[in-house]
């Protein structure tokens, strides 16, 4: 049975760090409020002129180096982003060119904060379907470009960054002991548009627009939806939640991470949390958290890892991987 294995990972954060105290100088907020309500202490923000493709390229190069691969060996580049450099062409094609690739295919995937989970599912299906052997999957965002910096209810929550993985086909046995992606589950409910959206776009306002969110409503749905996705993915792979070694959640709010872990009986020490240092980096948040735990040695080859995310749309999903 063909499986999709992660053979390398990398990340990149913009150099510029903005603390909660920095934000308190711009809007009516405080370090105490932000930390208590979200767990966020700081976020990285792109510099003037720094683009999503710059972040994506740096993360992609790090992942390729980790995999020991040359860009020429990549068949497909998927960039999961909601903040592309331009409306078109896809940021993935910019990365493709800057990596010096002259073959293969590249496209962007838009599922907002769930982008990386959707990307894993798409890449896995393309690999198992024989359309690609080696895929570069990137989650890259410049969320700061979508923020209304006068709106304290949203501008304190998000950050910029990029994470990437190199995925490759290999012949597994077809059971749960295989390395690689064991299961992905994707969901969406477009009726919930108004709870989290950007109030602009090429075919509506011809502007980029600003992120708008009914935070309380999103919070209310988050724990329920994420828990259901995790259970569906574990059931789909025939794995008990207690057998999972690491949970790598979307990093939106520490209280959502804690609530989900509690609901599913997951011990807090199994939950990878980077929200304090990164804020919510949308499609970059899961690969950034993953890379953090791989680099610091917590996640090891053979470990069972459950990734999950939820975002605008709503979209949500989960993926179960044996590292
Ligand atoms: O990536 C996926 C999507 N996003 C999420 O998952 C986010 C989900 N939602 C959340 O994380 C939380 O709902 C927030 C962090 C956004 C808000 O926390 P909350 O505990 O739901 O607070 P709230 O919206 O109920 O606001 C409480 C109070 C309000 O004041 P009043 O009406 O009680 O006087 C807000 O105006 O806090 C006020 N407030 C702030 N105060 C200081 C809202 N934002 C701020 C702020 N600083 N930045």
Image (cartoon, grey):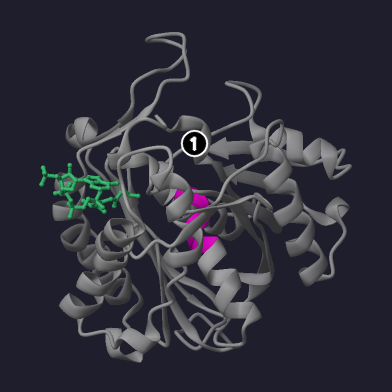
**Quarter of image, res 80:** top right
Q: Which residues are magenta?
A: 281-287
Q: Is residue 306 or residue 197 the one in the foreground?
A: 197
- Asked which secondary structure carries label 1, the reply is loop
**Quarter of image, res 101:** top right
**Quarter of image, res 261:** bottom left
Dominant SS type (magenta): helix
Q: In the displayed orientation, state which residue is furthest to the front.
A: 25
69 sits to left or right of 206: right
**Assess mark 1: CB under 8 A from ligand 1?**
no
Q: Residue at x 78, y 53 (%)?
A: 74
Q: Is residue 234 or residue 153 the one in the foreground?
A: 153
Residue 216 on the magenta segment: no
Residue 282 on the magenta segment: yes
The residue carrying mark 1 is 82
Q: Position of residue 203 (x, y in %)?
A: 42, 10
Quadrant location, the C terminus: bottom right
Q: Residues within 10 Å of mark 1 (few under 14, many from 20)?
A: many
Give the answer, above or below, for where 154 lies relative to 123: above
Give the answer, above or below, for where 123 lies relative to 263: above
Q: Position of residue 164 (x, y in %)?
A: 64, 58
105 sits to left or right of 115: right
Q: Is residue 128 or residue 289 the one in the foreground?
A: 289
Q: Residue at x 20, y 71 (%)?
A: 259
Q: Position of residue 214 (x, y in %)?
A: 20, 39
Q: Residue at x 48, y 61 (%)?
A: 286
Quadrant location, the N terminus: bottom right
């Amino acid at each position: 049975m063909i499986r999709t294995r992660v053979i390398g990972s990398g990340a990149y954060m913009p150099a510029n760090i903005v603390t909660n105290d920095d934000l308190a100088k711009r809007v009516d907020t405080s370090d105490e409020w932000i930390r208590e309500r979200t767990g966020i202490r700081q976020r990285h923000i792109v510099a003037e002129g720094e683009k999503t493709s710059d972040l994506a390229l740096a993360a992609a190069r790090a992942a390729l180096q980790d995999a020991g691969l040359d860009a020429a060996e990549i068949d497909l580049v998927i960039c999961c982003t909601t903040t592309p450099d331009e409306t078109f062409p896809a940021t993935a094609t910019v990365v493709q060119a800057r990596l010096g690739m002259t073959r293969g295919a590249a496209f962007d995937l838009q599922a907002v904060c769930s982008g990386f989970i959707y990307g894993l599912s798409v890449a896995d299906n393309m690999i198992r379907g024989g359309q690609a052997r080696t895929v570069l999957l990137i989650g890259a965002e410049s969320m700061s470009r979508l923020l209304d910096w006068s709106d304290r209810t949203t501008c304190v929550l998000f950050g910029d960054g990029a994470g990437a993985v190199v995925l490759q086909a290999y012949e597994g046995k077809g059971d749960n002991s295989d390395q690689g992606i064991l299961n992905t589950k994707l969901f969406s409910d477009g009726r919930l548009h108004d709870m989290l959206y950007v109030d602009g776009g090429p075919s509506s306002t011809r502007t980029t627009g600003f992120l708008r969110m009914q935070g309380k409503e999103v919070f209310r749905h988050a724990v329920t939806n994420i828990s259901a996705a995790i259970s569906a993915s574990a059931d789909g792979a025939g794995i008990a939640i207690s057998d999972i070694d690491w949970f790598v959640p979307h990093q939106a709010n520490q209280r959502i991470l804690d609530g989900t872990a509690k609901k599913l009986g997951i011990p807090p020490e199994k939950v990878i949390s980077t929200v304090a240092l990164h804020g919510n980096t949308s499609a970059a948040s899961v690969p950034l958290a993953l890379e953090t735990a791989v680099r610091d040695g917590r996640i090891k080859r053979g470990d069972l890892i459950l990734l999950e995310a939820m975002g605008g749309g709503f979209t949500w999903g989960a993926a179960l991987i044996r590292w």
